[in-house]
Image (cartoon, grey):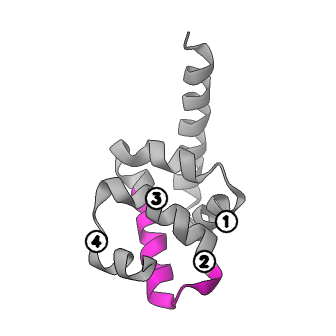
Amino acid sequence: MLSQALLLGPNDFWLIGPRVQDAAVLWPYLDQDSKDLALAQTRMLWEVPVLRGQLRVLLRSADGVNLASRAFKNRQEEVRQMNRWLSLDRQREATMP
């Protein structure tokens, strides 16, 4: 079912977060095409600014961190930018009443 969702709706923006969370957990059981789509959609969480909040949710689990590590392998500059964004986001959250 997840493989079909990844294939049929790769750009359904508001479903990308939950789909990549599922893909992170089910990673060992996914076929290669589904893995490739999950990696591409994980990268979309960073590349499309309105989706970045979903990236923060993905990174709360060890499986999500592993998926993001795979998705951004050999993309060190993006990882640095992401870490800066996450740090600033945490600071904003901490200072909000």
Q: Which residue is label 3 attached to?
A: 18
Query: Exactly how many numbered labels are in the figure?
Result: 4
Q: Look at the image and say whether residue 53 sits in the magenta stretch.
A: no
How would you rate the neighbour count of disc 4 (Cα within 10 Å): few for under 14, some for 14-19, many for 20 or more?
A: few
Q: Which residue is label 1 attached to?
A: 66
Above or below residue 72? Residue 50 is above
Name the residue located 46 percent from the left edge and 58 percent from the top edge: 18
Q: Estimate the x, y position of residue 93 in percent, counting from the top left.
A: 57, 23
- Which residues, given as a range, are shown in magenta? 28-44
How far apart are the alpha carbons under marks 2 and 4? 18 Å
Q: Are marks 1 and 2 in contact (CB under 8 Å)?
A: yes
Between disc 4 and disc 1, the foreground one is 4
How far apart are the alpha carbons under marks 1 and 2? 10 Å
Relative depth, front residue between 13 and 76 = 13
- Amino acid on which the number 1 mark rests in the picture: Asn
Q: Can you tell which mark lies on residue 9?
A: 4
Between disc 1 and disc 2, the foreground one is 2
Q: Can you tell which mark lies on residue 27?
A: 2
Relative depth, front residue between 80 and 59 = 59
How far apart are the alpha carbons under marks 4 and 1? 23 Å
- Amino acid on which the number 3 mark rests in the picture: Pro
User: Is residue 82 shown left or right of residue 10?
Assistant: right
SS type, badge 4:
loop
Q: Estimate the x, y position of residue 9 in percent, counting from the top left.
A: 28, 71
